[in-house]
Image: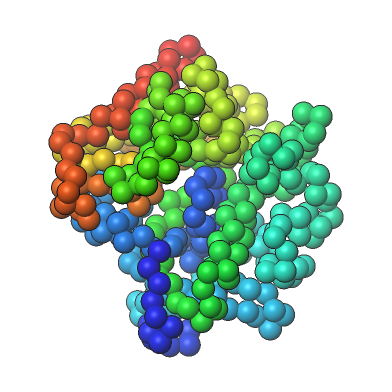
């Protein structure tokens, strides 16, 4: 993260945009925040910023649109609640625009109104109280790591599913951890730089999201020996080794329950190759049927991405993720048929996007001492296996 000196002046003077946790975040450890209805922001890592600023043209339709940077600072409101406020760029001085029916904003506002977020290390427990639910329904057993699989449908101690509100609280967990880290490591008047990126799910009514960690290697070229060993162990013990891809999180809208079924990265790490295949089928199941109509547009996007990755010499997308997205709310039955696979042209509203490039390296990037030749073999291996598994599902149906 790049931290500006506290004497630096932010663009926009006293204008501030309060940042809400992005409640459709299904994976990762850095907090994603909602800047406006079509924009999210995340802590700036210079290597990732440089990647976006030098992005090859062929990759632009497979990555979020880069919208620049913004200065962010901690601020307490009149009730003592600690939050993050962005000082927008001059071209972004219009008021924050959020859909009035946004569940994410309503939930976070409820949380803010019931308890000060800096007074308790467990925002999910606060949220449970605000919704008059027991903490046991919100947090999973201790082996799931602070309820990181917590979801609208979560497993109770006896293994049964308990229905909850229609949101994924992983974003709240990441947000609280981020606030705690900022409060601990920096004075409140420090200013931080965040990346502004396209909100790739803003057009979806009920965004179903699969976050896949791609490749057989996750550590960057700059990783310490300890970090390298840790990431290598995770890969060896998961489907990253045998398939070149593992699940980092997902949310699937269940039409029968009218809420999301969510899985986290700890679930993904435990999956066998057969379990991974079953999880892909679960991602495409809406609680009543398998959405077979999604397979063809998803495969078209993945095959197009594979062609692009094969053409990118020297790029290594270490620790990056791939999002597969579709709308859990089915289009009207009289929607016109189309052969295009883009989210704007396909009634199924399917998309595939690459994200998280903090450890991506390529010729001319930050590291001049290590240059890789040819396209990324681990990423290609993962994509090929992902395509093959989805084709197998398609053929069975």
Where does residue 237 sit, x and y in percent of width and height?
49, 26
Where does residue 196 sit, x and y in percent of width and height?
39, 64
Q: Is residue 364 left or right of residue 74?
A: left
Front residue of 208/272: it is 272
Where does residue 17 sit, x and y in percent of width and height?
51, 75
Q: Is residue 344 left or right of residue 142?
A: left
Asked if residue 6 is positioned above or below residue 391 in the image, the reply reads below
| Whether residue 343 is visible | no
Question: Residue at image x 72%, y 48%?
Answer: 165
**Screen quadrant of the N terminus:** bottom left
Where does residue 337 sit, x and y in percent of width and height?
39, 33
Question: Residue at image x 56%, y 27%?
Answer: 270
Front residue of 288/339: it is 288
Question: Residue at image x 29%, y 45%?
Answer: 221
Query: What colour scheme was applied to this rendering of the protein?
Result: rainbow
| Whether residue 390 is visible | yes
Name the residue at the top extreme: 396
Q: Quadrant of residue 376?
A: top left
How many numbered markers are drawn? 0
Q: Is residue 252 left or right of residue 336?
A: right
Asked if residue 48 is positioned above or below residue 71 in the image, the reply reads above
Q: Is residue 371 left or right of residue 286?
A: left
Question: Residue at image x 26%, y 59%?
Answer: 50
Q: Quadrant of residue 103?
A: bottom right
Asked if residue 300 is positioned above or below residue 76 in the image, the reply reads above
Front residue of 360/393: it is 360
Name the residue at the front extreme: 225
């Amino acid at each position: 993260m790049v931290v500006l000196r506290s004497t630096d002046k932010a663009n926009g003077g006293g204008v501030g945009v309060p940042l809400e946790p992005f409640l459709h975040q299904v994976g990762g450890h850095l907090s994603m925040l909602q800047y406006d209805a079509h924009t999210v922001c995340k802590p700036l890592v210079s290597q990732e910023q440089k990647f976006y600023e030098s992005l090859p043209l062929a990759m632009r339709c497979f990555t979020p649109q880069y919208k620049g940077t913004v200065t962010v600072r901690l601020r307490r409101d009149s009730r003592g609640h600690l939050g993050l406020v962005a000082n927008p760029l001059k071209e972004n001085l219009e008021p924050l625009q959020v859909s009035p029916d946004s569940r994410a904003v309503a939930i976070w506002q409820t949380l803010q109104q019931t308890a000060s977020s800096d007074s308790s290390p467990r925002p999910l427990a606060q949220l449970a109280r605000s919704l008059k639910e027991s903490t046991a329904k919100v947090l999973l057993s201790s082996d799931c790591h602070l309820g990181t699989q917590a979801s609208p449908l979560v497993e109770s101690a006896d293994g049964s599913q308990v229905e909850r509100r229609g949101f994924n609280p992983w974003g709240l967990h990441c947000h609280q951890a981020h606030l705690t880290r900022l409060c601990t490591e920096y004075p409140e008047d420090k200013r931080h730089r965040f990346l502004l990126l396209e909100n790739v799910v803003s057009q979806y009514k009920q965004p179903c999201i699969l976050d896949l960690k791609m490749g057989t290697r996750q550590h960057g070229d700059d990783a310490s020996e300890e970090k390298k060993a840790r990431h290598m162990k995770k890969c060896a013990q998961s489907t990253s080794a045998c398939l070149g891809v593992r699940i980092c999180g997902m949310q699937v809208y269940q039409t029968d329950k009218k809420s999301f079924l969510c899985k986290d990265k700890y679930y993904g790490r435990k999956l066998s190759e057969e379990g991974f295949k079953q999880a892909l089928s679960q991602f495409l199941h809406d609680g009543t049927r398998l959405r077979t109509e999604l397979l063809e547009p998803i495969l078209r996007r993945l095959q197009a991405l594979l062609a692009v990755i094969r053409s990118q010499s020297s790029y290594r997308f270490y620790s990056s993720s791939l999002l597969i997205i579709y709308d859990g709310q089915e289009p009207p039955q009289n929607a016109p048929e189309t052969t295009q696979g883009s989210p704007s042209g396909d009634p199924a509203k399917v998309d595939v996007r690459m994200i998280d490039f903090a450890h991506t390296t390529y010729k001319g990037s930050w590291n001049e001492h290590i240059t890789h030749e040819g396209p990324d073999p681990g990423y290609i291996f993962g994509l090929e296996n992902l395509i093959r598994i989805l084709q197998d599902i398609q053929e069975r149906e």
